[in-house]
Amino acid sequence: MTTDSKHKGIIAEAHTPSACATVPAHVAIIMDGNGRWAVRQGLDRSAGHSEGVKTVRRITEAATARGISYLTLYTFSTENWNRPKQEVDILMHLIVTAIEQETPDLIANNVRLSVIGDMERVPDHTRQRLQASIDATSACTGLNLILAISYSARWEITEAVRKIAQEVAAGILDPHTITDKHIARHLATDAIPDPDLLIRTGGEMRVSNFLLWQIAYSEIYVTDKYWPDFTAADFDDALADYASRQRRFGLTGQQVSET
């Protein structure tokens, strides 16, 4: 894992959408540090979440400008339901209100919104409001903005196993024919490519139950900056660091360079 690496010489290349070898198609972000940012400012934790919404907007804009096709944001985990009820209620309200407010701009910028996660745990009125924004952006063909809400990787994998087990029990599927591709098709991210780059803000060195199956070969970039302080320039640093790496996928460096 790299912390705040600077590779200024290749940032211009990383900015160029046509530089396919250096620009990740899919970036996933663990947006950590909202609460700690607020505490350091002497503010209530909810202020950090509100400030974090502004960062979502600027990083979505930056991802669009840099030619990234998929941006997945870890917005609310299944574990977050265990936080104090007042904070959970504030978070749910903030998330759906921010999405509604941003929907016209998403449409104007050709951004398509989708959500992955256990929607059965989300209150009906919140789910309906989210769905309205998803429907409103469904014709957009630019950046795919994916919000992981009420999501955890273990929940997702458990659901996939349950569906596969049902197919086996029904005689639809021979268990000896199950492959990793078959499992991937039963995940919430079916039809979404695996992340090329995983960014975590806030300095913690863990993946927090996020896209565990999908990030098997993702490049990982960790910055000490809290999410509210994360800027487009910081995003560029992560992209530049990604562009400097050789992705081997189990091969040797020589094999990769010869392809």
Image (tube, helix red, strand yellow):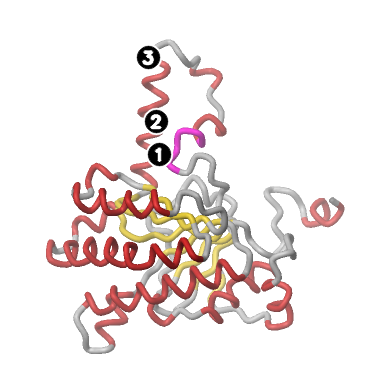
**Residue 186 among magenta residues:** yes
Q: Which residues are magenta?
A: 184-188
Label 1, label 2: how far apart the Cα atoms are: 6 Å
At horizontal 44% and vertical 67% (from top left) the residue drawn is 105
The residue where tag 3 is placed is 169
Residue found at x 43% / y 41% = 188
Residue 213 placed where, x, y %?
Answer: 49, 45
Q: Helix or strand or loop: what does disc 1 sit on?
A: helix
Q: Residue drawn 87% across and 53% down?
A: 258
Amino acid tagged 3: Ala
Q: Which residue is label 2 attached to?
A: 161
Q: In this image, 80 relative to 219: left or right?
A: left
As helix, strand or loop, the secondary structure at mark 3 comes to helix
Q: Is 39 located above or below residue 21 in the figure?
A: below
Decide which of tag 2 and tag 3 comes sooner along the chain: 2
- Alpha-carbon span between mark 2 and mark 3: 12 Å
What's the distance in space between the residues labelled 1 and 3, CA to CA? 18 Å
**Label located before the other in sequence (1 or 3):** 1
Q: Mark 1 — residue?
A: 157
What's the residue type where badge 1 is placed? Answer: Ile
Mark 1 and mark 2 in contact? Answer it, CB < 8 Å.
yes
Mark 1 Cα shell of 10 Å, populated few (<14), some (14-19), many (≥20): some
Q: Is residue 17 magenta?
A: no
For the residue labelled by badge 2, is the local secondary structure a helix, a strand or a loop? helix
Left or right of residue 74: residue 216:
right
Name the residue type under label 2. Val
**Label 2, residues with CA under 10 Å away: few <14, some 14-19, many ≥20:** some
- The picture places residue 11, in percent across and down from the top left corner, at 68, 78
Q: Which secondary structure dominates the residues rendered in magenta?
A: loop
The residue furthest top is: 171
- Look at 14% across and 64% down and name the residue there: 84
Spot occupied by residue 63 in the image (x, y as percentages of width and height): 55, 67
